[in-house]
Image (tube, grey):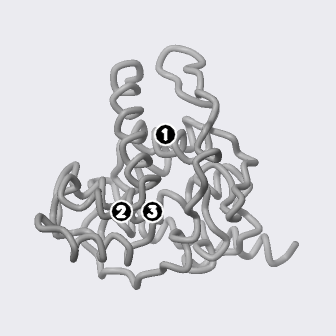
Amino acid sequence: MLLVKYSRVLILTLLVACEQKTSPPPVTKVEEADTTESKKQTTSDELTQPEAILLTTNRISPYDYIVKKYARRYGFDWRLISAQIFAESGFRENRKSRAGALGLMQIMPSTAKYLGTSPDVLLRPEDNIALGCFYDYKLYNYWDSLKGRERLAFMFASYNAGQTRVRRAQRKAAIKHTWVGIKYYLPGETRHYVFKIFKKYEEYKQKVL
């Protein structure tokens, strides 16, 4: 119990220290951790998720307040993060994948450890969203040579498949710095994942302020 409390204090301290009110600034590129998200690759049957219902006007899920809080902290549109959560778990806070990914943003225990916190907190909605947004932030800054939608696509692909796999796809591609240029050198699941997030994001932008 003391370890869990300590981990929660540690992650919140880390998150506050990294707080930004504008778009994420460049930071030192993180070490690649393919033993984390790359192991999260799932089978096609795991991708079938229930549609999240827009509960009321301008509301996406019961976690909107938390998503807005941490999306704002790291400079993301909260609807984009909501679209990612939809793609990851369909807003099921207790979801566990066959590969072992946990919670709303389907974070691997090894990823939690890599980011400096205990896996014990991953089924807590706020801790999971906070850590997932922080990981997005690190990946976003890892791809600081890219801009706009391309940068987001590479970020999401890295979240799903691992940075080394995305780098490997870059090396194989003739056009190395666009999503269209590299995506066919990545697994079908990763391509579908990125597509699904952007599609849901466009839907949320039309329906939610």
- Mark 2 = which residue? 186
Tell me the amino acid under the disc marked 2. Answer: Leu
Task: State whether residue 158 is above or below residue 209.
Answer: below
Q: Residue furthest right?
A: 1
77 and 84: which is toward the camera:
84
The answer to whether mark 2 and mark 1 are in CB contact below 8 A is: no
Q: Nearer the viewer, residue 166 or 70?
A: 166
Tell me where residue 152 sits by quadrant: bottom left
Tally of numbered tags: 3
Residue situated in front as seen by the camera: 103 or 189: 189
Residue identifier under label 1: 82
How crowded is the residue under tag 1: few (<14 C-alpha within 10 Å), some, or many (20+)?
many
Circle 1: residue type = Ser
Front disc: 3 or 1: 3
Whether residue 45 sits left or right of residue 137 in the image: it is right
Residue 169 position, x and y percent, is 28, 70
> What residue is shown at x 15% (from left), y 64% (from top)?
177
Q: Which residue is mark 3?
A: 159
Dot 2: few (<14), some (14–19), or many (≥20) neighbours within 10 Å?
some
Q: Is residue 151 left or right of residue 78?
A: left
Q: Which mark is residue 24?
A: none
Distance from the alpha carbon under mark 3 to that under mark 1: 15 Å
| Measured Cα–Cα span from mark 2 to mark 1 | 24 Å
